Every structure is written in structure tokens, then in C-alpha cells.
Amino acid sequence: YFFTIVTIPETGPSQKTPQVMVTLPQRSGLQPRQLGLLINDNNPDSVILGEYYARRRNIPLENIVHLNISKVIQLSRTEFQPLKAQVDSMLPETVQAIAIAWTMPSRVECNSITSALALGFMESPCNTGTCTWATSFSYFGSNSTQPFSDLRMRPAMMLAVLNIEQAKQLIDRGMASDGTQTQGSAYIMNTNDGIRNLRGRVFPSSNLGTNLSSYVDVQIKNANWIAGTTDALFIFKNY
């Protein structure tokens, strides 16, 4: 940005300063005050992971919610509702998204825990045994960069790793990639889960390759898992 300051005295001619250039840092993605962090105090690994993530990402203390959850794979809807209420009541209005510092529990009945925290528990798929959702979501196709302020929902992600060392490496790689506009691939997996395996079948072929972005090569893989790749930016898998 370039500025010229003009002074206008009460008497006499106005005066201009030489042009001044000011460089402001470029904003990229979420800022620390916009990210909430959930830690399960009943899980020592979650505490270690959460504290490391908070320190590396400078997450404000008021954005960190400490919970006490059993280390189980699945929660019931009855168990989940007070947890969701606690999270919603404790996170500041500035928080636009949530990071979850644990791998278990990973679901609420048939909902993933990330979608349940973001959208609330959805009964229809669990009651009907199908992937038919009763509600459409305004965030789909939206350009909003502040989904909670605009749409009253917070996208959630899980820091899913096998051990603390891998978790720290994942966080460090994320820090190193900030602002780099990394190029890589997005893999949409066609697994053998015929009921839930929808993305690969309905994804428009016109959006494959680099048609959506010159930075991301979108590919469909007919496999249950992927291995031996070093360029994965996104993996969408229903298995």
C-alpha cells in the first residue's frame, strides 16, 4: 500500500510528505482466534496433542474446550447431546471452525463425530439405515469464509493419527505449508462399501484433473485404501 500524507495548516499552503509504502502481511486461511480446539482430558494422548497444537497454532485459551469423554469408538445420541451443548456454550462467537484433538470417539451412532459437531446429530440416516439426509445445508457451494457468523455452523476436523510423534509431524508439516499454495492431488476413493460409496459415482467427470484448480489434480481411485503417495492433499473415502 502506498500513502501520501497531506497537511493543511490554518494559514499558508498545504504540504505533502513523500510517498510512503506500507507492506501488510497477507491473510491466508483461518486466524488463531477463529479456530476452536477440543481436548479430551480423559485421554492423555489427547491432552498432549491438544497442548502441542494450541502452542504451535497460537490458539487462545478461551478457544480451548476441555471435555471428559470415555475413550470409546462410538457415542450414543444421548451421550452426545450434552457434549455438543457444552462445546456450543463455551466457544466464543469468533470461532468459525473446530479442531478435535482425539481419534476416539469417532462417531455418534451412524454420524461421524465431525459432522455431528458441525451440523448437530442427524437422526434420519440412523433411523432409516440409509444415507438419505433429511436436510440440505446452505454451506454446500457457499463462498463463506466465516461459516459460523454467516450460517451458524462450524466445520470440524479431526487430528487423526496413530501416535503422538506422527501427530506432531503432521502439525509441523501443516505449519511449514502455510501460505505456500502447495500443489498435489485429491483422491476420491471408490471402495467396496456399496451403500456409502457415493462420491466417486456422482462426482462430475468435468471436474477431474486440474479443471477445478491448477494446484489440485482430482482423481478417482477404485480401491479401499491408498498407499505409496506423497502428494495427497485430500482423500475422500467411505470405508
Image (tube, rainbow, N blue to C red):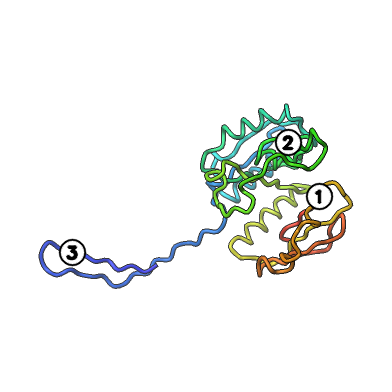
Name the one closer to the observer, 139 or 31. 139
- Residue shown at the point (54%, 47%) measured from the top left: 34
Which tag is nearer the camera, tag 1 or tag 2?
A: 1
Give the CA separation, mark 2 to mark 3.
65 Å
Give the CA separation, mark 1 to mark 2.
27 Å
Q: Can you give x and y, in whole percent of width and height, for residue 159 in the image?
A: 71, 47
- Picture quadrant of residue 129: top right
Which tag is nearer the camera, tag 3 or tag 1?
A: 1
Residue receiving disc 3: 8
Q: Which mark is residue 71?
A: none
Q: Is residue 207 above or below residue 190?
A: below
Q: Is residue 127 above or below residue 29?
A: above
- Residue shown at the point (62%, 57%) measured from the top left: 175
- Picture quadrant of residue 188: bottom right
Name the one closer to the observer, 166 or 87. 87
Q: Can you give x and y, in whole percent of width and height, for residue 3 in the image?
A: 33, 67
Give the CA separation, mark 3 to mark 1.
67 Å
Q: Can you give x and y, in whole percent of width and height, for residue 171 in the image?
A: 67, 53
Q: Can you give x and y, in whole percent of width and height, for residue 154 in the image?
A: 61, 43
Number of other residues with Cα within 10 Å of mark 1, as a class: few under 14, some 14 to 19, many 20 or more: some
Q: Determine whether the residue tagged by mark 1 lies in a helix, strand or loop.
A: loop
Residue type, mark 2 in image: Asn
Which residue is outermost to the right? 192
CB-based contact (under 8 Å), mark 1 and mark 2: no
Residue receiving disc 2: 43
Which residue is outermost to the bottom? 18
Quadrant position of the N terminus in the picture: bottom left
Residue receiving disc 1: 238
Whether residue 189 sits left or right of residue 23 in the image: it is right
Q: Determine whether the residue tagged by mark 3 lies in a helix, strand or loop.
A: loop
Residue type, mark 3 in image: Ile
Which tag is nearer the camera, tag 2 or tag 3?
A: 3
